[in-house]
Image: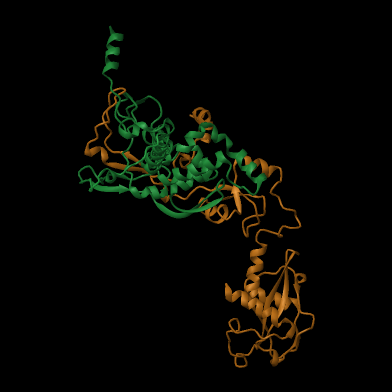
Chain colours: A orange, B green
Amino acid sequence: MMDGILRNFSKLLSVQNPIHQFNRTLIILKRRHPVQLQKKNSKHKPILKGRHFVYDIVENPERMKKEKIDVILTQYVEGLGHQGELVSVRPTYAYDQLLLPKLAIYASPDNLERMKNNLYQAKDEEKPSSIHALQTAKYLKKMVVSVSMNKDEPWTIEPWHIRVSLRKMNVHVLSDDSIELPERPISGPDFTLEGKSFVVYITINKKEKVPVECNLHHWSTKLADRLPRTKFYTRTPIAIFPEQAELLMSMRGNTNND
Amino acid sequence: MESKLANGLKLLYIPKKTKISSGIGDRLPEAYKKFYKEWRHKVPEPVYYKATPGKWTKDEKTGAVIPVQNIPIPLKYPKTMHSGIWGGEAIVQGFKQSGKYKSRVPHFWTPMLKKTVVYSEILNKYMSTTVTEKALDEINKNYGLDHYLLKTSACDLRTTLSLKIKRHILMALRDKTFYVDDNVKQQEVYDKYKHYLNNYTHEEIEWYGLTFDEALLKMQDIEELNEKKAPLKAKYRLELIEELKNSNETVEENKSWLNKLNPFN
């Protein structure tokens, strides 16, 4: 028995996936009652009775998930790949989002040949640091981070405060070096700063620098002393430093447009 | 004896009358007739069923050897299909039957239509059309609309719209009327697609992708141009001038008949 398995093992490996059969997008029908044999080389149309129109569905690929196709990107696409990269995506997404707006071309033999000669490759300096970098930058730019500081003890804002506040919002900054605070220090407790905003810069992969809006909030460990909750993320931002006011407004303006 | 019989049968054979072999259609040029045969008479690729390969098969139960006869599933071609790219798909009319002793229920299997945009590289145009999933799949498989249309024969494209686009593409390729401003790009695109032009002559492209009625109108136009009917006005004018010239040679005093009459005689 083992011999048989071994002998046919190569056949098992080469068996094609049923999806690979022709006409993947078409429904395949079969007559339940086969038509009787026709005369050889007959010029007449076969006589079809009512029973010959009873069909069974052999396969219905409309319900199957479509096979991915390969495309070559002609441009950096957020979350997908760099310029000149071969990616495999679902055909509908590829056609609507990549091929029609000319963000990508088909991976035909000609185009693959050209890709090998690095015709579509971009230089490393022009590339974003990773395929998700710009997406992350967009996400961070939209954020309003609440920085909760102590109401009773004195403090000065340091990078780790921002790191912790971002962590509360599920953004994990790996190193404090990538957080850049405003030039002038902010210290407190100072109730004139309550609910006001300032901008810090976060560097992604030591390349993309993103401004992030932070909102100062005073917080107490005692329940009775705590300030009431506010919707600081919907209010128009009031800048702690007047030079940042314009930047803050423009960032909020972008979010409103989206 | 047999050969004589075969000859006799040949004499009996009368070719079937078709639109292009009888009536006014017979006068159409060969170039159009070739296209029409490719469009209407050629057997299209199997859709909706799997053609069994080979000449013979074995019966599953008895093991008896039987010849393979792939009888295609009859398709219905609705009028609306001509305003889209259906990629050979059409409508199947038939029955569903859930069990041997259940009554069969009429059912139409129709393609899933999708409103989308197709892009032709040669025409450099985005076109909003109705397509089927199969057509989109074929476009992706052939790496673009241009390759798909140029590769596929008319019987598989079937719809008037796709044939019209193919006609425009072929004419643009033949006359090099694409990317007129950019010569480098034009040459690049031309080199990519020029091998498709080998299948057609200049005249065949002229007549490609026309419906029967359009072809008749075109033939009528050409015939009228060749005849060049001059207006009768010009003809009569010439005749009159001729006549006057002739009359000048033999000058005669035109005396009115009134002069002949003299009431005082």
Residue B115 locus on image (x, y percent): 44, 55
- Residue B241 in sight here: yes
Residue at the spot x=66%, y=40% of the render? A113
Residue B198 to residue A174: above or below: above
Q: Quadrant of residue B29?
A: top left
Residue B12 locus on image (x, y percent): 26, 18
Residue B211 locus on image (x, y percent): 39, 41
Between A145 and A160, the one nearer to me in the picture = A145
- Residue A241 in sight here: no
Residue B159 locus on image (x, y percent): 40, 44
Q: Residue furthest top?
A: B1
Does residue B148 appear left or right of residue B211 in this picture?
A: right
Between A33 and B197, the one nearer to me in the picture = B197
Residue A103 to residue B260: above or below: below
Count of numbered circles in the view: 0
Between B52 and B28, the one nearer to me in the picture = B28
Does residue A244 appear left or right of residue B246 in this picture?
A: right
Between B97 and B220, the one nearer to me in the picture = B220
Of the 4 image quadrants, the one containing the C terminus of chain A is: bottom right
Residue B39 to residue A210: above or below: above
